[in-house]
Amino acid sequence: MSFDTLGLSDKILSAISAAGFDKPTPIQEQAIPHALKGRDILGIAQTGTGKTAAFTLPMLNRLEKGRARARMPRTLILEPTRELAAQVEESFEVLGANHKLNVALLIGGVSFADQNKILDRGADVLIATPGRLLDHFERGKLLLTGVEILVVDEADRMLDMGFIPDVERICKLIPFTRQTLFFSATMPSEIQKLVDTFLHNPVSVEVAPPATAASTVEQKLVSAPRESSEKRAVLREVIRNEKTLTNAIVFCNRKRDVDIVNRSLRKHGFNAGCLHGDMDQRSRMATLDNFKNGEITLLVASDVAARGLDIPNVSHVLNFDVPIHAEDYIHRIGRTGRAGRSGTAIMLAGRADKKYVDAIEAMTGFNIPQLQSASEDKGKSHSETESGNSHKEHSNNRKRRGGGTSRAASKASSGQTAPSDAVRPSSTKAPAPKSEDTPKVSENTSNQKQKQKVVGLGDHMPAFLTRPVRPDSK
Ligand code: ADP
Ligand code: MG
């Protein structure tokens, strides 16, 4: 199957080949012909399957006829985050290279005045986050009555971010006769309701079951204590021992942990940066660019910040926390193994995470292999006696130490077999990770004495740190 047969114009086809796309991905192949006929589309596909071009290409075809009028965008694309919106804009630049289109981006962190200027020129394509769009609308700078095509992208993330009421409002502001292209990796019931309300007899295109993790991603589970500083030590061990790790996204559940983990990694000599929703637009873009061009090799991120980001060639996804929502696991590990490349997803999990891991496994229908022997796991059960709130890490050492098994232990001295690669911090070149003794950004230095020997993997050197893992060793 080639792009030629889908019904796209020659201008578009030449931009596609200039972009280096040889053949359509399954979602593109199935959605584009229907979209070109004006049908509403419900596209369900995991991340990295090429959903952006699945709506960009038919939109370009439609936009070849007609002209935009001031403040009346002809098409509207809703994206949950600023980064995703910027990525879609890039996609229009590439695939719309042969079209003279006015593409406007309405995202937070950019001045209203600048955005108004672009809107005044008349936007063929308006790409916006829901809140910012409504801001402009309420200021009277925008009329939505000329919208011919509405795209709702990453709908399930909109849901997670609480944007559904905004999306609903926007849907109601746009003429009923519009064409709607709706994309989501998963279909929770709230999304289904939205689809039932706002799509007209949609063609449903589903390229993989909603909960299927990319088959090109190797998944692993690593036992980790709940206490944060020890858990961070486990993270470092994982990074040092993953020989194929060239770059990675490290996911945390909470924004504040994104900061803590990022600072801790940097403190330990790793080349890290972070991405979370509270950062201003400029620093988010700068971080992302640095990650894309390899200046940063470890990107610590929250789900919100990383949703749907197209970052090619991520070798690893490291789940510092087990996601509370099983769907997030799919999205997270979808950051690696994209476009047919192989990738590795490693998740740190303790006993308290079991129900979430179970939920993920139930959803994906796949038992994630544990890279640790059962006996080692038993030795860790005391970690569950902690109060469990990681934000108490500054004060809960007393509790932790009273938890039974001593964590002071032989060093899981990691470093010795780690390969020399770009990701590895210079500090790991020393065989013993004495860096543990140096105070960390976020740790109470008064604990340092007690913790001198604590490396984070308990009393034993986990076997996986000393030898290559065989599939039958779980
Ligand atoms: P999704 O939105 O489904 O997560 P994207 O649209 O961001 O996925 O696409 C993921 C990656 O695949 C991007 O780097 C994109 O350029 C690339 N891509 C999309 N379509 C094709 C294609 N037909 N051939 C080759 N690469 C493609
Ligand atoms: Mg996408």
Image: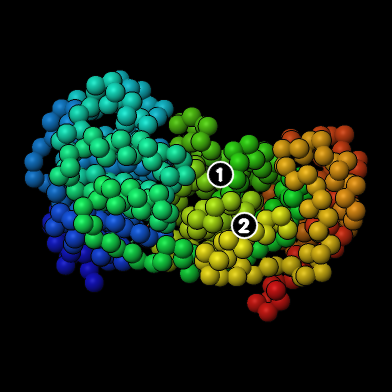
Q: Name the disc covering residue 178, or none.
A: none
- Between residue 351 and residue 294, name the one nearer to us: 351
Determine which residue is flagged by label 2. 356
Residue at 62 percent of width and 54 percent of height: 322
Give the crowd class for mark 1: few <14, some 14-19, many >=20 residues within 10 Å.
Answer: many
Q: Disc 1 marks which amino acid?
A: Ala
**Quadrant of the rendering where the C terminus is positioned:** bottom right
Q: Where is residue 148 shown, x and y percent of the image?
A: 16, 42
In the figure, 13 relative to 371: above or below? above
Residue nearest the viewer, comparing 194 with 254:
194
Say how the picture is coloured.
rainbow
The residue carrying mark 1 is 301
Nearer to us in this view, 85 or 430: 85
Task: From the top left corner, tell me how far across and down residue 229 is, in percent.
Answer: 76, 45
Per the image, label 2 sits on a secondary structure element best described as helix
Determine whether, in the image, residue 427 is placed left or right of residue 72: right
First in sequence: mark 2 or mark 1? 1
Q: Residue at x 82, y 50 (%)?
A: 385
